[in-house]
Amino acid sequence: SNRRFGIEKLPQELTKWFQLDLVINEGVANRKRSQDANSDVSHSKRTCNDTSMGTFDEFCDINQYGKPAMKDLLNWVVAKIPSQWKSFGTSLGFANGVLEGIQVDTSCGGDPKKMFHRLLENWENNPPSPYNWGTLLNILVSPILKQNRLAKDIAEKLRSGSLNSL
């Protein structure tokens, strides 16, 4: 009789599992749609061409200021705020999967400077936001990073044409 009872309950148990699976999948889909929507909104705030001009949009002009050289990014940004690499990447618009991939990359060995360097290489080669000084400086002064002094120092160096380390 125990076997019979188990068989009778099987459809009820399967129904519960299917319902749970539907709830989980719908939750994942909703979260993905929400992340996509948020990504689209925040991405538009990171460009130099939007209507809400950022503080440092003059530095978006690559004809005047050039594109950031990796050496300068390493000396000016990575050396100063290595632990903020993931927030910087999020602000640029990189997907969490890309950031997590960098974080688990064994060649970085968990070193925040190496992870930041890898992130900057990704930004240079496959930019989700324009690869220029204006984007970098606007992200530094964002409410997430709050690196106003660092941004101001870099802007002064760029204006003076002095590309030596800060």
Image (cartoon, rainbow, N blue to C red):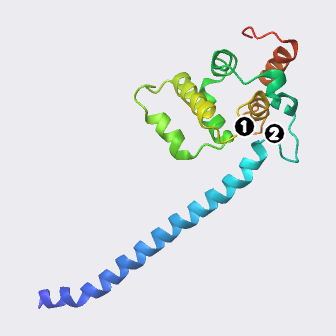
The residue shown at (63%, 57%) is 36
Q: Is residue 156 left or right of residue 113?
A: right
The percent position of residue 108, horizontal first and vertical second, equals 46, 25
**Quadrant including the N terminus:** bottom left
**What residue is disc 2 on?**
48
Q: Secondary structure at mark 1?
A: loop
Q: Which mark is residue 117?
A: none
The residue shown at (67%, 52%) is 39
Crowdedness near tag 2: few (<14), some (14–19) or many (≥20) residues, C-alpha within 10 Å:
many
Mark 1 to mark 2 CA distance (whole Å): 7 Å
Q: Nearer the viewer, residue 47 or 30?
A: 47
The residue shown at (63%, 30%) is 124
Q: Nearer the viewer, residue 38 or 24?
A: 38
Which residue type carries mark 1? Pro
Q: Secondary structure at mark 2?
A: loop
**What residue is disc 1 on?**
130
Callout 1 touching callout 2 (CB < 8 Å): yes
Residue placed furthest toward the front: 63
* Placement of 36 over or under 135, stated as above or below: below
The percent position of residue 98, horizontal first and vertical second, equals 52, 41
Which residue type carries mark 2? Cys
